Image (cartoon, rainbow, N blue to C red):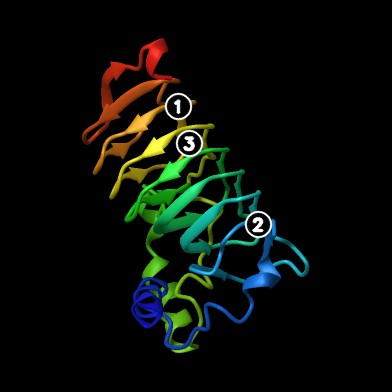
Amino acid sequence: MLKKIKKRIKLFLGIKNIDLQSNKSKYILSAPSSDISSLNIFVRKPFEGKKYLEIGNESIIKGDYIFEIQEGKIKIGNRTFIGGGLFICIDEIEIGDDVLISWGCTFIDNNSHSIVWSERKDDLSQWKKGLEENKIGGFYKDWNNIKRGKIKIKNKAWIGFNSIILKGVSIGEGAIIGAGSVVTKDVPDWTVVGGNPAVVIRTIPENER
């Protein structure tokens, strides 16, 4: 399974050789009571001594965590379960306590490319240069023109499998995201949403909270 994960990350990052485990503890601050054995992390040009991923108590955290620039940060709370998926960060992703995130979900706090052609016209040549030097494809990329926004998942939320959470989104306390949803705007507390783009299906009554 780990070999398959490494292969998928290599294809995504566009590099030939990568050890996803050797520097895990270097970039992570995790409570001893949490399980991070199935977590993979990759940081491009990291700041020395910075902890990019913080994890609270009694959590089970799986998945692939990619920090495209030095300033990115992900914080995960207590008693939270993440069953896999892909997290791509250049800004900030904050996940609260008692959150459930199913397998196959994607969290990305940026647009990856500028919507302005003149600002993205060199993305391919920069990516190619990185590949030729066996570095992450975006090693030479200028991220200054890329729109970004913090993602916040509040306490007690539940996100169904294969959902996509885009930049700048806040998911409310106790909210439920239906499987396969694409969340493009804030989700109120104690609501169920679903679809592409996700829309409110119903409000969760007091006796179900």
In the figure, is residue 65 to the left or right of 46?
Answer: left
- Type of amino acid at the residue the image marks with label 3: Gly
Q: Which residue is mark 3?
A: 168
Is mark 3 in CB contact (under 8 Å) with mark 2?
A: no
Q: At 61% across and 50% down in the image, what residue appears?
A: 58
Question: Does dot 1 land on a helix, a strand or a loop?
Answer: loop
The residue lying toward the viewer, choosing from 109 and 163, is 163
Question: Does dot 2 land on a helix, a strand or a loop?
Answer: loop
Q: At which x and y percent is residue 158? A: 40, 37
Q: Which residue is mark 1?
A: 174
- Type of amino acid at the residue the image marks with label 2: Ser
Q: Which residue is mark 2?
A: 33
Question: Does dot 3 land on a helix, a strand or a loop?
Answer: loop
Indicate whether 34 appears above or below 110.
below
Does label 1 or label 2 sit earlier along the sequence? 2
Q: At which x and y percent is residue 77? A: 61, 43
The residue lying toward the viewer, choosing from 28 and 89, is 28
Indicate whether 47 appears above or below 201.
below
Does label 3 or label 1 sit earlier along the sequence? 3
Q: Residues within 10 Å of mark 2 (few under 14, many from 20)?
A: some
Marks 1 and 2, how far apart at CA = 24 Å
Eye-nearest disc, 3 or 1:
1
